[in-house]
Image (tube, helix red, strand yellow):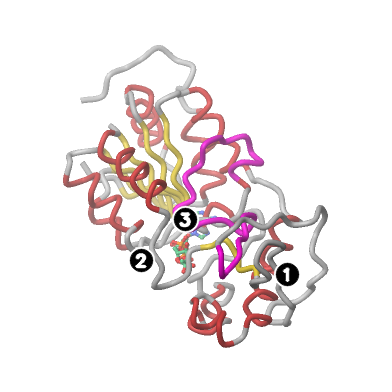
Amino acid sequence: MSDISNGVSRESLTQVANLLRCAERIAILTGAGISAESGIPTFRDSLTGLWQQFNAADLATADAYRRDKELVWGWYEWRRMKVLLSEPNPGHVAIARLANERPLCTLITQNVDDLHERAGSQDVLHVHGSLHSPRCFACARPYHFPDGIPEEPEGGRRLKPPVCTHCGGNIRPGVVWFNESLPAAIWQASELAVRTCDVLLSIGTSGLVYPAAGLPSLARRLGKMVIVINTNATEQDRMATHCFRGRVGEVLPALLADGWGRPHVKVE
Ligand code: OAD
């Protein structure tokens, strides 16, 4: 079954809403596209993507941090400031609603912001870590940010990282950098959720960064439904069973509203 919609066709919305309704276990994988409508830049969108403006090798590796801690810390504090100044959007809210209505729904995100949580989602699996959970680069003990919004005003401006009160080491962002392993327990829980789901929703991700990018193909190999929601064509489209080309903040609320309150209709 393949259904590529330019915008949102009512027929496919109803069909996929029914699939979701009949699914016992749902896994959701989100990427930067879901936070784009909250004003958080994605990584690879032309013009506005972070990796169009900044060099990942200078900012998102442990070697980069060793070379220039202040540059790296300042850049992540600038990103954290942007997140703290933003609000969840209707896409985050729709996912929180779905997860709260369906106890066997697992939310896996590549995003390092906390917009899913602020929209009401719980137990979010942050496979790439979080801007809000820094730790010591030396001893890995967690560091707690003071309340409030950091003052760092511009991307690229240097800022001295805080120091660990236990060992005096430098504090690093709590994100997963390139060439680092994903947090093992979170990754195992993510893979398990995909292996055991009936439907995987892949939302707002380019599907280019592994291992998270491998989750939709894992789901398809196991015969699961894979629903992709993205403004653009992606690598995942060829393996999707349903594909919506549109903004997540419009497609997802429409999908979850459409037919959600009607009696079950089994779609074969
Ligand atoms: P990308 O920037 O690679 O992809 C974002 C996707 O969202 C693109 O496919 C866009 O077409 C889509 N998109 C943008 N706005 C959208 C909207 N309003 N509605 C629906 N889709 C929209 O971001 P990710 O796939 O999340 O990792 O990137 C994966 C990883 O690469 C990130 O977690 C980060 C990055 O390097 C690390 O830093 C380790």
In-front residue for pair 74/215: 74
- Under mark 3, the amino acid is Gln
If the image is split into quadrants, where does the N terminus sit?
Answer: top left
The image quadrant that residue 180 belongs to is bottom left
Mark 3 Cα shell of 10 Å, populated few (<14), some (14-19), many (≥20): many
Q: Which mark is residue 110?
A: 3
Verify CB contact (< 8 Å) between mark 2 and mark 1.
no
Picture coordinates of residue 94, whole percent (x, y): 55, 35
In-front residue for pair 232/199: 199
Direction from residue 129 to residue 225 in the image, left or right: left
Direction from residue 57 to residue 38 in the image, left or right: right
Mark 2 secondary-structure assignment: loop
Q: Which residue is mark 2?
A: 208
Mark 2 and ligand 1: say if the CB distance to the nearest ligand atom is below 8 Å: yes
Q: Earlier in the sequence, mark 2 or mark 3?
A: 3
- Under mark 1, the amino acid is Pro
Verify CB contact (< 8 Å) between mark 3 and mark 1.
no
Q: Give the CA distance from mark 2 to mark 1.
A: 33 Å
In the image, the segment drawn in magenta is: 116-139
Magenta run includes residue 125 = yes
In-front residue for pair 51/245: 51
Q: Give the CA distance from mark 2 to mark 3.
A: 12 Å
Q: Earlier in the sequence, mark 2 or mark 1?
A: 1
The image quadrant that residue 206 belongs to is bottom left
From the viewer's perspective, is residue 180 above or below residue 24?
A: below
Q: Which residue is mark 1?
A: 162
- Under mark 2, the amino acid is Leu
Q: Residue at x 55, y 29 (%)?
A: 97
